[in-house]
Image: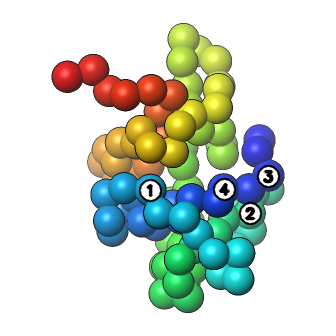
């Protein structure tokens, strides 16, 4: 599991895109540190940690293996965040 996420995970739900977090607003969850752009986003995450990416803190799953993803490629599906390795096919 990676140790920190500099991209604000709440922004994927509220803004639909990656937004850099500020280290002054941070929370620890499931062994990782998450950064947020505001105290409101931190409070939302603390209340509902399902904002964390799926697969135990890894960013992507490809061919049955957990791999690093790219925070620019995301999918919010059924209220869950999936960060992908590359652009979704169209």
Q: What element carries label 2?
A: strand
Task: State the image quarter where residue 21 is shown.
Answer: bottom right
| Residue 34 in which image quadrant | bottom right
How far is mark 4 from mark 2, CA to CA? 6 Å
Q: Which of marks 2 and 3 is nearer the N terminus?
A: 3
* Mark 2 vs 1, N-terminal side: 1
The mark closer to the camera, 3 or 1, is: 1
Q: Where is residue 29 in the image (x, y as percent from the top left)?
A: 71, 63
Q: Name the residue under label 2.
A: 33
Q: Nearer the viewer, residue 89 or 61?
A: 89
Residue 71, compared with residue 90, is above or below; it is below
Q: In which quarter of the image is the C terminus?
A: top left
Q: Mark 1 points at which residue?
A: 18
Q: Which residue is drawn at 45% across and 26% down?
A: 86
Depicted 32 relative to depicted 15: above or below: above
Q: Would you say the residues marked 4 and 2 are in contact, meaning their CB atoms lie under 8 Å apart?
A: yes
Helix, strand or loop under label 3: loop
Are discs 3 and 4 less than 8 Å apart at CB? Answer: no
Instruction: State the colouring used for the structure image.
Output: rainbow
Q: Name the residue under label 3.
A: 3
């Amino acid at each position: 599991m990676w140790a920190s996420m500099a991209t604000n995970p709440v922004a994927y739900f509220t803004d639909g895109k990656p937004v850099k977090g500020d280290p002054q607003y941070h929370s620890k969850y499931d062994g990782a540190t998450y950064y947020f752009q505001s105290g409101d986003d931190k409070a939302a995450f603390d209340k509902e940690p399902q904002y964390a990416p799926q697969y135990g803190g890894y960013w992507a799953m490809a061919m049955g293996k957990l791999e690093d993803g790219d925070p620019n490629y995301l999918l919010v599906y059924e209220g869950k965040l999936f960060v992908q390795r590359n652009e979704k096919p169209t």
